[in-house]
Image (spheres, helix red, strand yellow):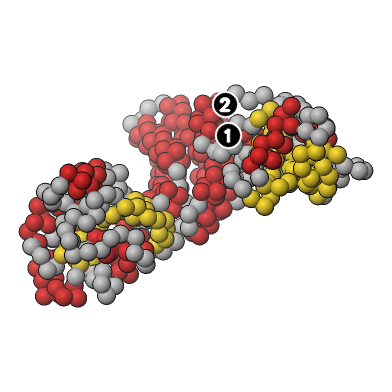
C-alpha cells in the first residue's frame, strides 16, 4: 500500500450490516476542513466534544443528523487530526455519508491505514499495531486479555529488555575496535561470550512462549477421529454441551466434517468431528472419510476415540498412520468397558491415553486438561503473563533470527576470529529484535501486515 501522508482519508469504522449507530472516521491534515464542508452546525466546533448537527450531501441536501467529534493532532489515534461522525447505522446511510466526504476532498482509506498512520506517527510500535487486529478477532476472554496486554506494550517491553544489554555490549566492542588498548579497557573474549550466552538464554525463554501464545491468538484445531460408532459425535456434543452432531447407533452417521468452536481453559479450540475411518458403505460416506483423512495435516491435535467395548486391534492399524506427537487417545465407554482399560493402555503404549465416558462425562475434565497442556507446549498453566507471550509466526521468526546471530557471534569469539565479525552478528541480532517493534522493518513487510486489517481500522 503506497501512502501519501498529505492525504486526508475516510472510511466507515463500524462493522458491516445494520446497527443503531454507525461511525465514519476521517484522518489527515484537512480532516476538519473536509468535515465542515459536509456538516451543518451552529457555532464553533470544540475539540473532544460531541457536536450535534446535520450531515449534508454534495448538493447540500440533508443525508442524516448526528454527532461530530474532533480530536486534533497529536492527541488522537493516528497522531493526526481525526474526525468521527456518529450517525444512524444503516448501510445505505453510511455509504452515502462516506461518498459525500470523499467528494469533499477525502480519499477512501485502505485496509489498516488508520493504524498504519498511528505506527508511522509513533503512537504505536509494530507489535502493538498487530495486537489491534488480534484484539478485534479475539474469540475468548483469555485471547482478548492477551491481545490487550500486547497492545499496552507487554511484548514490546520484553523485546526492549532483550535489546538493551546487546546494544551495550555492541557499543563496548565497537569502542574497542575504534580505540587502542591504552585508551579503553577491553573485555576478554570469554566475558563477551558469557554475555552473549546470557542474552541467548533470555531469547530462548521468550521463544518458549510461542506455543501457548499462538494457540491463544489463532485457536487450536482439534480433529476427532476414530472408527464408526466409537463415540466421536457423542464426545463432541459433551465437549460443546449441546447436540450438534447426530448421535445414533448406526455406523457411518457422520458423513461430513462438522466444525464448532469452544473455549477450554480460556483457549479457543476448533473441534472437527469427522466420518468414521473404515471402508465406506456408500459414495457419500466415502467422501466423508476422505475429508477426515485430508484434515489430519491441518489439525494441531488429534483426539482418536477408541471404543473399549470393540476390537482394539483395528484401532492400532489406524493409529500407525497418525502423527504420534499430536495424537491423544480417548478410551471411550469406560463406564461399561473398564475391564479392558489396562489392555488398552498396553496396546496404545507410548500414546497419551485418557479414559472417558461420553455418556457419563467421566474423564472429560482430564481430557480438557491434556488438550490445554499439549497446546501450551507441555505447560499445565500459563507461566508467562499472557500479554508478554510470543503469539505470531512473524515474531517467532524474528527471535529465531536473533538467536542465530548470537550463536554465530559466540562461535566467532570461540574460534578467535576478528571481533568485527562478532560485532556484525550482534548487530544483526539487534536488528532482528527491531523488526518485532518496527524499528528495522521494510515497507514490504509493513504492506503485508496492514493489508490483513479491516478498512476503517
- Are circles 1 and 2 on residues that touch, CB within 8 Å? yes
Using the image as rendered, state which of residue 79 and residue 184 is in the foreground: 79
Q: Quick one: label 1, few (<14), some, or many (20+) residues within 10 Å? A: many
Using the image as rendered, state which of residue 421 and residue 138 is in the foreground: 138
- With 233 as the anchor, is 117 left or right in this view? right
Q: Position of residue 192 (x, y in %)?
A: 44, 39
Is 87 drawn above or below residue 421 in the view shown? Answer: below
- With 118 as the anchor, is 359 left or right in this view? left
Can residue 245 be seen by looking at this rendering? yes
Residue at image location 51% in from the left, 36% down from the top: 452
Secondary structure under badge 1? loop
Is 337 drawn above or below residue 145 in the view shown? Answer: below
Residue at image location 55% in from the left, 38% down from the top: 453
- The extreme right residue here reads 43
Label disc, if present, on residue 111 of the rendered structure: 1
- With 69 as the anchor, is 327 left or right in this view? left
- Pointer 2 residue: 1
Snapshot quadrant of residue 111: top right
Q: Position of residue 70 (x, y in %)?
A: 79, 43
Residue at image location 37% in from the left, 27% down from the top: 417
Measure how far apart labels 1 and 2 are at the Cα level: 9 Å
Using the image as rendered, state which of residue 353 and residue 385 is in the foreground: 353
Q: Position of residue 123 (x, y in %)?
A: 67, 41
Amino acid at each position: 500500500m503506497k501512502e501519501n501522508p498529505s492525504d486526508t482519508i475516510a472510511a466507515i469504522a463500524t462493522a458491516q450490516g445494520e446497527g443503531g449507530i454507525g461511525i465514519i472516521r476521517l484522518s489527515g491534515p484537512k480532516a476538519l476542513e473536509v468535515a465542515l464542508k459536509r456538516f451543518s452546525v451552529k457555532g464553533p466546533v470544540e475539540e473532544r466534544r460531541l457536536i450535534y448537527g446535520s450531515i449534508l450531501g454534495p448538493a447540500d441536501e440533508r443525508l442524516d443528523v448526528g454527532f461530530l467529534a474532533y480530536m486534533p493532532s497529536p492527541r488522537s489515534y493516528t497522531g493526526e487530526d481525526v474526525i468521527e461522525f456518529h450517525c444512524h447505522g444503516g448501510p445505505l446511510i453510511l455509504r452515502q455519508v462516506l461518498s459525500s466526504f470523499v467528494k469533499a476532498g477525502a480519499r477512501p482509506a485502505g485496509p489498516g491505514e488508520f493504524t498504519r498512520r498511528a505506527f508511522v506517527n509513533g503512537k504505536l510500535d509494530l507489535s502493538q499495531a498487530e495486537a489491534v487486529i488480534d484484539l478485534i478477532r479475539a474469540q475468548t476472554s483469555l485471547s482478548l486479555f492477551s491481545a490487550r496486554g500486547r497492545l499496552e506494550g507487554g511484548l514490546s517491553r520484553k523485546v526492549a529488555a532483550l535489546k538493551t544489554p546487546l546494544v551495550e555490549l555492541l557499543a563496548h566492542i565497537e569502542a574497542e575496535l575504534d580505540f587502542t588498548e591504552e585508551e579503553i579497557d577491553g573485555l576478554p573474549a570469554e566475558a563477551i561470550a558469557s554475555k552473549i550466552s546470557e542474552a541467548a538464554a533470555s531469547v530462548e525463554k521468550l521463544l518458549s512462549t510461542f506455543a501457548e501464545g499462538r494457540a491463544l491468538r489463532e485457536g487450536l484445531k482439534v480433529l476427532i477421529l476414530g472408527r464408526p460408532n466409537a463415540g466421536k459425535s457423542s464426545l463432541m456434543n459433551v465437549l460443546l454441551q449441546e447436540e450438534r452432531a447426530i448421535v445414533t447407533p448406526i455406523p457411518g452417521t457422520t458423513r461430513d466434517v462438522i466444525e464448532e468452536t469452544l473455549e477450554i481453559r480460556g483457549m479457543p479450540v476448533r473441534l472437527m468431528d469427522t466420518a468414521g475411518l473404515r471402508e465406506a458403505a456408500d459414495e457419500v460416506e466415502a467422501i466423508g472419510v476422505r475429508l477426515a483423512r485430508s484434515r489430519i495435516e491441518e489439525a494441531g491435535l488429534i483426539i482418536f476415540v477408541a471404543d473399549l467395548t470393540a476390537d482394539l486391534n483395528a484401532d492400532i492399524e489406524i493409529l500407525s498412520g497418525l502423527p504420534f506427537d499430536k495424537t491423544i487417545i480417548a478410551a471411550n465407554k469406560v463406564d461399561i468397558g473398564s475391564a479392558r482399560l489396562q489392555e488398552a493402555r498396553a496396546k496404545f503404549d507410548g500414546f497419551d491415553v485418557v479414559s472417558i465416558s461420553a455418556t457419563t462425562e467421566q474423564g472429560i475434565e482430564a481430557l480438557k486438561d491434556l488438550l490445554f497442556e499439549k497446546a501450551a507446549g507441555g505447560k499445565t498453566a500459563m507461566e508467562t503473563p499472557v500479554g508478554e507471550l510470543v503469539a505470531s509466526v512473524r515474531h517467532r521468526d524474528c527471535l529465531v533470527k536473533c538467536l542465530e546471530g548470537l550463536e554465530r557471534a559466540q562461535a566467532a569469539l570461540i574460534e578467535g576470529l576478528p571481533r568485527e565479525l562478532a560485532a556484525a552478528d550482534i548487530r544483526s541480532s539487534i536488528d532482528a529484535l527491531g523488526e518485532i517493534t518496527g524499528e528495522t522493518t521494510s515497507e514490504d513487510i509493513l504492506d503485508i501486515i496492514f493489508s490483513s486489517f479491516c478498512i476503517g481500522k
